[in-house]
Image: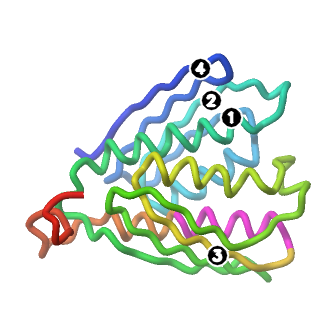
Amino acid sequence: MRSSEVLRETKETAVSVSIVLDGTGQCSVETGLPFLDHMLTACGRHAGIDLTIRAEGDLSVDCHHTMEDVGIVFGTALRQAIGDGRGITRFADAAVPMDESLAQVALDCGGRGYLVFEGEFSPAGAGGIPGDLFEHFFYSLCVNAGITAHIMAKGKNDHHKCEAIFKAFGRALRAALAVDPAASGVPSTKGTF
């Protein structure tokens, strides 16, 4: 079974993530940030993964550490669940519209973490989360998961743009991590990620 559980505790946060890649999209997310919970639930549902996330952070300071550390632990759990990548499709992309907004995500789940993020949120962001933290969340996730992601979003409403991004990321992740029945090894000419 492609699954993992990761716990990370610091002086700023305590975050646990449990993930089953071959799940049914059952998600239970409690980070102390209701909007982030909503986004991660949408991502997990569209990825078709079972996802449990619990986070306690220093939200009395601000939400930066919680956003960053949830990204780190989610990414680490993904990397562990992917393992050596044997049999996965590896590359995938998805486009998701949400009213006036459109998000496009292209992924390479080949073991190298990198993020290109094109899109802007207002400084106030969505759901009380400053706009720049969404890019930082995906950076933390991708670097720790070993995923190269190109994320592009346009639109007028921050909520719509953000939700389209998380859903598109989930749809692309689902396709990239799908087992390719024609593949017998690691999808790389190197023979390893």
SS of the residue under disc 1: helix
As rendered, which of 182 and 49 lies closer to the eye? 182
Residue at 80% in and 79% down: 155
CA gap between label 3 and label 4 equals 32 Å
Circle 3 residue: 152
Disc 4 marks which amino acid?
Thr
Quadrant of the image occupied by residue 169: bottom right
Residue 146: image x %, image y %? Answer: 40, 53
Circle 1 residue: 66
SS of the residue under disc 3: strand
SS of the residue under disc 4: loop
Of labels 3 and 4, earlier in sequence is 4
CA gap between label 2 and label 4 equals 11 Å
Circle 4 residue: 10
Residue at 31% in and 45% down: 81
CA gap between label 3 and label 2 equals 27 Å
Whether the residues at callouts 2 and 1 have beta carbons within 8 Å, the answer is: yes
Circle 2 residue: 55
Residue sitting farthest toward the left: 184
CA gap between label 2 and label 1 equals 7 Å
